[in-house]
Image: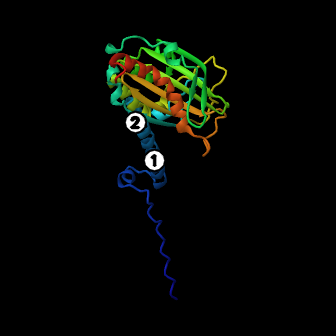
C-alpha cells in the first residue's frame, strides 16, 4: 500500500525587518524591528536637538515696525486723508530763517479771532498757543526726528469752531530752518502722518471726537510749514453738503501772518 507523501513544512516568510548584519549576530527579526524603531526615534530626537541649537544660535527675530502700525500717543488721533503742497515762489523772501529771524507770536498768528470763508462760513478761535519746543505740539518718533533735523524752533496752534458748531479746525504753523527743510517735511508727511501728527490743542472747550473722521493738508510756505486739520464736530464723514474745501480755505486765513512777513521784507509793491 502506498503511503501518502509527507507534507512539506511551509517556511516562515522572511521578515521585512531582517538585516544581514543583525541576523548574522543572531538577533531575531522581532528584535531587529524593535532596534530599528528605537534607532529611528533616537535619530529624530538628535535632529530636533540639533535644529534647536541652530535656531538658538541665530538669535531672536523682531519684525520691523511699519509706519502705518505705529502706536498712537494718548489722546492723539490721525487724519484719514492728507494732501501736500510745495511752497509757491511768492514765499521766496522768507525762504530762510536767517532773513526772517523774528520769532512768531501768538498775537501775530492768531490775533484775528474770527476767520471768514465762502457761503457765510465763519470760524471762531476757541484756543491758541505757541510752543518754543516743537515736541510739545507734535508727536511721533520719526516725525520728531525730522523736525529736529529741520531745526524746528516754534509750533503755533490755533483751534477754531464754526459759528454754527458744525465744524472744527486746527491750524498749526511750524517755524523751520529753511525752505528746503519745509519742502522735505511736507513731502515726508504724505506717508509720515500715519505714525505722527500734530497734538490737538488742550484746554479748549471743543475737540475732535476720538476716532472721528478728519482730513488734513500740509503747505510749505518758505521756511514755514502750515498744517490744516479739519472735521465735523460730530466726527462723522462729510456728506455732499459739507464743503471741506471752503472750510480749508477759511482756516488758512491764519497764514496771513506769513504774508505780512513777506511784505515786510519786499515792500508793499510785491
Q: Is residue 6 left or right of residue 213?
A: left
In this rendering, is residue 1 above or below 134? Answer: below
User: Colour scheme in the image?
Assistant: rainbow
Residue 4 lies, in percent from the top left, at 51, 83
The C terminus: image quadrant: top left
Q: Secondary structure at mark 2?
A: helix
Residue at (34%, 16%) from the top-left corner? 265
**Disc 1 and disc 2 in contact, CB within 8 angstroms:** no
Q: Is residue 54 left or right of residue 235?
A: left
Residue 223 lies, in percent from the top left, at 37, 21
Quarter of the image for residue 151 reads top left
Residue 11 lies, in percent from the top left, at 46, 68
Residue at (32%, 14%) from the top-left corner? 99
Residue at (43%, 50%) from the top-left corner? 27
> Is residue 235 or residue 71 the one in the foreground?
235
- Alpha carbons under labels 1 and 2: distance apart: 22 Å
Mark 1 — residue? 35
What label does residue 50 carry, if any?
A: 2
What label does residue 240 carry, if any?
A: none
> Is residue 267 or residue 177 the one in the foreground?
267
Dot 2: few (<14), some (14–19), or many (≥20) neighbours within 10 Å?
A: few
> Is residue 191 or residue 63 the one in the foreground?
191
The mark lying in front, picked from 1 and 2, is 2
The answer to which of marks 1 and 2 sits earlier in the sequence is: 1
Q: Secondary structure at mark 1?
A: helix
Quarter of the image for residue 17 reads bottom left
Dot 1: few (<14), some (14–19), or many (≥20) neighbours within 10 Å?
A: some
Amino acid at each position: 500500500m502506498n503511503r501518502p507523501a509527507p507534507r512539506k513544512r511551509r517556511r516562515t516568510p522572511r521578515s521585512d525587518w531582517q538585516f544581514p548584519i543583525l541576523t548574522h549576530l543572531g538577533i531575531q527579526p522581532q528584535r531587529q524591528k524593535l532596534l530599528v524603531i528605537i534607532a529611528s526615534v533616537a535619530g529624530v530626537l538628535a535632529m530636533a536637538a540639533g535644529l534647536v541649537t541652530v535656531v538658538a544660535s541665530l538669535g531672536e527675530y523682531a519684525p520691523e515696525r511699519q509706519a502705518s502700525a505705529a502706536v498712537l500717543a494718548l489722546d492723539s488721533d490721525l487724519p484719514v486723508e492728507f494732501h501736500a503742497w510745495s511752497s509757491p515762489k511768492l514765499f521766496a523772501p522768507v525762504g530762510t530763517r536767517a532773513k526772517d529771524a523774528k520769532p512768531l507770536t501768538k498775537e501775530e498768528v492768531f490775533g484775528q479771532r474770527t476767520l471768514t470763508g465762502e457761503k457765510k462760513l465763519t470760524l471762531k478761535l476757541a484756543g491758541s498757543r505757541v510752543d518754543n519746543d516743537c515736541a510739545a505740539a507734535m508727536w511721533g518718533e520719526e516725525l520728531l526726528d525730522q523736525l529736529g533735523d529741520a531745526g524746528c524752533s516754534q509750533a503755533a496752534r490755533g483751534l477754531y469752531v464754526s459759528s454754527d458748531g458744525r465744524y472744527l479746525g486746527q491750524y498749526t504753523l511750524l517755524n523751520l530752518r529753511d525752505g528746503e527743510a519745509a519742502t522735505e517735511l511736507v513731502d515726508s508727511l504724505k506717508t509720515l502722518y500715519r505714525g505722527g501728527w500734530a497734538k490737538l490743542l488742550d484746554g479748549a472747550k471743543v475737540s475732535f471726537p476720538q476716532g472721528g473722521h478728519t482730513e488734513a493738508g500740509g503747505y510749505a510756505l518758505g521756511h514755514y510749514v502750515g498744517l490744516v486739520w479739519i472735521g465735523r464736530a460730530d466726527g462723522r464723514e462729510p456728506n455732499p453738503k459739507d464743503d471741506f474745501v471752503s472750510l480749508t480755505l477759511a482756516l488758512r486765513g491764519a497764514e496771513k501772518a506769513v504774508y505780512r512777513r513777506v511784505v515786510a521784507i519786499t515792500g508793499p509793491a510785491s
